[in-house]
Amino acid sequence: MNYQGVLTKMQTENGSPIQYYLVFENDFLHVNQLLDKKISINFLRYQCLNCNLQKKVYRQGFCYDCFFDSPQTAAWIISPELSKAHLGIEDRDLEYEKRIQLRPHVVYLANSSNIKVGVTRKTQLPTRWIDQGAHEAIEIVEVPNRYLAGIVEMALKNHISDKTNWRMMLKNDLKDEDLVDWRNNLKQFIPEEASEYFLENNLETHLEFPVLRYPTVPKPLNLVKTPFYEGVLKGIKGQYLLFEDNTVFNVRANEGCVVSITVN
């Protein structure tokens, strides 16, 4: 069977295990059904996710022009403390910024390779944790806008990491942590203007990924350097496909690549 389309991040459904889908314009692929099967990935060309033109992708699936023009790639996306919609101040598109920024956001702890702090819209849970490959996670605060979430994250970053070691995550080189205890210990560092939003009674969320075998020495697949790859799929974790020969393919990092996928 052959599937063709532009790559976007895999869609997910939480379950035991998590279900993954590659969604194309006219078709979709239930990736869990490919476990233990040989598949090939063939890079055909680029297609910007914003303007849909066949232009080289610069970052996040966007061409150079769209990356620096679109509100979807503004600095506040990565750095939520830069959000200004709550003040009525426009960055690139105030109406878009209000729709995204002026919604409930969560600051959380996630354990993927280590415990890290992060921010996401409330509606993106547990999707955000799944995308990061976290096997356990917990909310710390739920605030009414992105700015407040950003300043909480900034304060907590002085006491805990905000990065994931993707190699450790993919090797499943992990240990369980008491995230309730971590959350309670970090309460003292939450800025006063967000302290009323602290969540005291929620419990950890545990996530199960569909992996038959983890790579021992993960080798990232770069489609530009290696436009054709074939291997046996052994697992899916985060936004990565894990293959029998230790090759790992980050779907999210290859958004905007038009590919042909063949299932043998």
Image: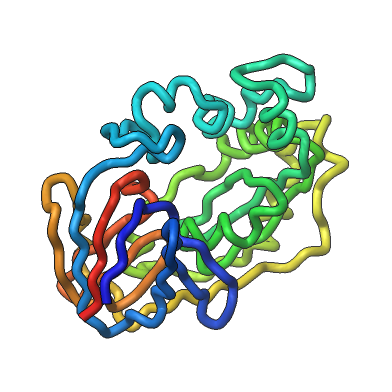
As drawn, is 76 to the left or to the right of 247?
right
Q: For the point 67% across and 68% down, which residue is it?
A: 204
If the image is split into quadrants, where does the C terminus sit?
bottom left
| 91 and 27: which is toward the camera | 27
Residue 251 figure quarter: bottom left
Residue drawn 66% across and 60% down? Answer: 138
Q: Is residue 65 above or below residue 245?
A: above
Q: Residue at coordinates 68% horizontally, 28% vertically from top-left?
A: 97
Q: Note whether residue 166 is visible.
A: no
Q: Is residue 104 left or right of residue 248?
A: right
Residue at far right of view: 196
Q: Residue furthest top?
A: 89
Q: Is residue 74 visible?
A: yes
Q: For the N terminus, which image quadrant?
A: bottom left
Q: Nearer the viewer, residue 247 or 166?
A: 247
Say if 248 sits above or below 95 in the image.
below
Say which of 100 and 138 sits in front: 100
Report whether 15 appears left or right of 192: left
Q: Nearer the viewer, residue 189 or 171?
A: 171
Q: Residue at x 38, y 70 (%)?
A: 236
Q: Is residue 141 above or below residue 153?
A: below
Where's residue 25, x and y in %?
44, 56
Percent across and percent down for residue 149 are 70, 37
Task: Indicate the quadrant where residue 92 lies.
Answer: top right
Q: Would residue 96 be found to the left or right of residue 234 on screen? A: right
